Amino acid sequence: MSEFDLVIIGGGPGGYVCGIRAAQLGLKTAIIEKRPTMGGTCVNVGCIPSKALLDSSHKYHDAQHGLQDHGIDVGKVKLDLKKLMSRKVNVVKELTDGLDFLMKKNKITVLRGHGRFVGKDSNGIDLEVEGEKKEKVRAKNVVIATGSAIIELPNMKPDGKHIITSDEAIALDQVPDHLIIIGAGVIGLELGSVWHRLGARVTIVELLPGILMSMDRQMREQAQRILTKQGLEFLFEHKVTEAKVKGKEVVVTLEGKDQKKSELKGDRLLVAVGRRPYTDDLGLDKVGVKLNQRGRVEVDPHSLATGVPGIYAIGDVIEGAMLAHRAEDEGVMVAENLAGKKGHVNYEAVPWIVYTWPEIAWVGRGEEALKEAGIEYRTGKYMFKPNGRAKAMNEPDGQVKFIADKRTDKILGVFIVGPNASELIAEAVIAVEFGGSAEDIARSFHAHPTLAEVMREAAMDVDKRALHG
Ligand code: NAI
């Protein structure tokens, strides 16, 4: 039986990053992974393929609708969906190949198969890996990094053809005529954008009164207006109660908040109502690891230790935002603590990004959350429209909003709806990590002409001294 200092169950961004850091620090490390490739949901069927599709569909849409304004006439634009999809497959393959290389480089043992706990004693934890053959391993420490699985709704079981999940929605071989999406969350908005740009009518049905309800209200309403103007159709405060496939059609039954029923017909229905922690057949009972009421592995919020000595959990399987970068940082922290260092994760500085266009990104708390917490603040805003670089790019939509403590000026939240928001937010994340103030951003050079100047002007506007406002 092989023995390791650390065995990680799950080779997604949380697990493989934890493995690399542990190996760097000298721990004998193994990762159990049941997929044939490393990278988990994010690299294989989530973040990465969806971004490849978002970039391709953005170019297609731009070629049709954006280039004329620049004086470029490309004639009739043709979509080669097969090629677009095969590019996406290649992007994923190059990255998963890269991960195999990193595993070898760091001398991490990858055990292929389903991992589960079988028992423990005072010297270690026993696991089995069920792959082509059954294998037993023993570990001094184990990190559960098994991630999450798609939530399925009872009256609309995915059939993989007409009623689909994000797994199929990133691999359709035809542009739908009318794609209905349940859920105006991150997946609904991103994949809705992809297929809308490629020519589908897209209707998004959402239980709540708006998109991205945890975000600052003014900024999410602005994003919603822009997406609606682009042609995405939203039906808020509607619940999908049933979906039936009739021939080539999906008939969706909706219930409004007045309890009135109505029907919507489309050729595909994407169910994107969230993900659940994935703990199926893990043998948690064999070692005494507990789940909370929401089915997430219970951990100490600082050390991410379960109640069982030597067993930790990170990422989607524990409470918190289901984000790859959060899982990565938690993996690094646990590995560093195991190696005797002082790892840390600053949850106040976790960025959120939605890769629509314009992009939506934020870090920290919005006005509503701060009011609820009784914290006094000042806000500063600046639009992209008057910015020189945004004008040159013909990207006028959106705004940046800084929220800073009224007394100390410490940055409490930064919200961006705009071009390249996914990259611009990095500056705000670093400022929050360093406990920076709006004045710190306002007094730092921002090269001209850049979109980043919008960040600086918004930070200046906290003190009502934007230069170009
Ligand atoms: P989500 O939790 O973001 O959104 C699901 C939405 O569905 C919610 O707004 C909810 O109110 C709505 N909903 C639930 N039941 C409904 C019903 N019966 N009828 C109508 N609406 C209903 O979940 P989503 O979009 O599936 O994403 C899953 C996870 O993956 C999220 O936790 C997200 O953080 C992560 N993710 C992150 C991305 C990013 O960071 N760019 C990209 C894609 C996913």
Image (tube, rainbow, N blue to C red):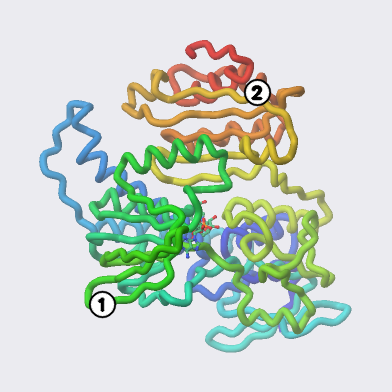
Looking at the image, which is closer to me, 309 or 90? Answer: 309
> Residue 90: x percent and y percent?
36, 59
Looking at the image, which is closer to me, 295 or 249? Answer: 249
> Relative to 169, is 194 above or below?
above
Q: Which mark is residue 308?
A: none
> Relative to 431, is 180 above or below?
below
Say whether residue 465 is left or right of residue 181: right
Q: Residue at x 35, y 29 (%)?
A: 395
Mark 2 = which residue?
438
Q: Residue at x 81, y 51 (%)?
A: 341
Q: Amino acid at mark 1?
A: Lys
Q: Amino acid at mark 2?
A: Ala
> Relative to 77, is 293 above or below?
below
> Residue 443: x percent and y percent?
63, 16
Q: Residue at x 50, y 73 (%)?
A: 35
Q: Is residue 166 visible?
A: no
Looking at the image, which is closer to me, 233 or 89? Answer: 233
Mark 1 = which residue?
246
